Amino acid sequence: MEFVTGLVQLQEESSCPVCLDYLKDPVTINCGHNFCRSCINMMWKDLDDTFPCPICRFCFHNKTFRSNRQLSNLTEIAKQLQVRRSKRKRQEEYSVCEKHNQFLTLFCGKDLEVLCTQCNFSVQHQKHHICPIKKAASFHRKILEYSLEPLKDNMERVEKVISLQASKIVDLKKKLPSVTIQHCSNTIDYILSCTFYSCD
């Protein structure tokens, strides 16, 4: 299982965060993130003075990146491996931004919403903490797990109380016929005694 997980992770690392396909002519920008050369050129096409990273939003003053031959070789190896995840399968894991028609691969921690790389650059999210969806999902999953612990403890206590109450109800039902007969007998004796005294 660990081998398969490792292969899947290799294939994920060999894919471009913009197009979600395997990296083609991979380049590394100064912050260390990797993209297809054509994808980063497309992202920076209409920009003049600052060039932000589509992932971490760190801005550069010039359009510089370097080819990454080692990553290119690893991408070729990942393509050849048997554990294949088609582009369509990877695309099914992500929704598409209605505004920009790009994959929603980022998460805004302040607004708690998913973003595409274009939305990431909007003024609305400019000073917000943005991270990849998988990292955000892992973080929020841990928060949920910690939140569930006290609820599980309370649930166990409630189940014990319900079980105890149910056993008391069963005991009372067993005693009920004898209590009812005794009560009726006492009531009859009382009525008879009252009528006896009223006759005197």
Image (cartoon, helix red, strand yellow):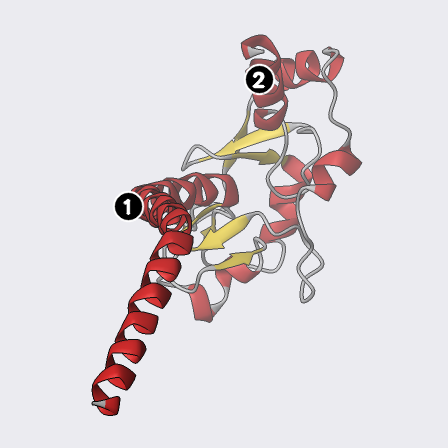
Residue 57: x and y in percent read 43, 51
Give the residue at mark 1.
150
Tell me the mark number nearer the camera, choosing from 1 and 2.
Answer: 1
Amino acid type shown at disc 1: Pro
Report the quarter where the N terminus lies: top right
Q: Is residue 116 left or right of residue 49?
A: right
Amino acid type shown at disc 2: Thr
Q: Nearer the viewer, residue 143 or 82?
A: 143
Distance between mark 1 and mark 2 Cα atoms: 32 Å
Q: Secondary structure at mark 1?
A: helix
Q: Earlier in the sequence, mark 1 or mark 2?
A: 2
Q: Secondary structure at mark 2?
A: helix
In the image, is residue 86 above or below residue 6? below
In the image, is residue 97 above or below residue 92? below
Q: Is residue 2 left or right of residue 152?
A: right
Residue 161: x and y in percent read 31, 48
Query: Image point 59% across, 55% down: which residue?
Result: 116
Q: Nearer the viewer, residue 197 or 144?
A: 197
In the image, is residue 120 above or below residue 133? below
The reply to whether residue 66 is in sight is: yes
Residue 154: x and y in percent read 30, 47
Q: Nearer the viewer, residue 64 or 123?
A: 123
Which numbered dot is residue 168? none
Which quarter of the picture shows residue 41? top right
Residue 71: x and y in percent read 57, 19
Give the residue at mark 2.
5
Q: Nearer the viewer, residue 35 or 41?
A: 35
Report the quarter where the C terminus lies: bottom left
Query: Image point 34% across, 50% down: which residue?
Result: 165
Q: Residue furthest front?
A: 200
Query: Image point 75% across, 35% down: which residue?
Result: 89
Which quarter of the picture shows residue 30? top left
